[in-house]
Amino acid sequence: MQEKHIPEILATNKFSSARIVRVLIEEEMGGITYSVQYVTDSKETLDQYYIEDEPKFHQEALGLFADKMLSFRTELEVISEH
C-alpha cells in the first residue's frame, strides 16, 4: 500500500498528499482498522479521478487485499484550518 498503491495514485497528479490514519474506535470484530485519506484541489479534480483512474486502482487493491479491505468514499470539505 505505502510503497506501490499510494504512490501510484499520487502520480496521477490529482492529489497533493495522502495520509494513512489508524481508526481509534474498537471494531466489533476486533483487529486494527486503517484509513487512507487523499487531498485534492477541487471537486472537479476528484470527479475526474473517479472517471479516469479509480476503477483501475480499485481492482488492483481488491487483487492485493481481497476480503481484508473495505472500500468506500467519504468526501470531506475543509472549512477552516488553524
Image: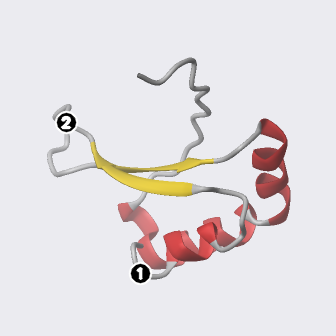
Query: Dot 1: within a 10 Å radius of its alpha carbon, few (fewer than 14), some, or many (20 or more) residues?
Result: few
The correct choice, above or below, for 59 with respect to 17 in the image is below
| Residue at image coords 61%, 26% | 77
Q: Nearer the viewer, residue 61 or 77?
A: 77
- Residue 1 figure quarter: bottom left
Q: Is residue 54 left or right of residue 37?
A: right
Numbered circle sitting on residue 54:
none
Q: Position of residue 31 (x, y in %)?
A: 16, 51
Could you say where residue 38 lies in the image, as x and y percent from the top left?
A: 55, 50
Amino acid, disc 2: Leu
Quadrant of the image for the C terminus?
A: top left
Q: Is residue 75 left or right of residue 17?
A: right
Residue 49 position (above or below residue 12): above
Residue drawn at 41 percent across, 54 percent down: 19
* N-term mark: 2 or 1: 1
Q: Position of residue 9 (x, y in %)?
A: 62, 68
Q: Residue furthest front?
A: 82
Count up the numbered dots: 2
Label at residue 24: 2
Please, is residue 79 above or below residue 66 in the view?
above
Taking the image as shown, residue 63 lies to the left or right of residue 10, namely: left
Q: Position of residue 17 (x, y in %)?
A: 53, 56
Seen at 77% across and 56% down, the residue is: 49
Q: Which mark is residue 3?
A: 1
SS for tag 1? loop
Distance between mark 2 and mark 1 Cα atoms: 24 Å
Q: Quadrant of residue 78?
A: top right
Q: In the current view of this chain or complex, which residue is farthest to the bottom?
A: 4
Which mark's residue is nearer the viewer, 2 or 1?
1
Seen in the picture, residue 4 relative to 10 is either above or below; the reply is below
Q: Three-letter amino acid code at disc 1?
A: Glu
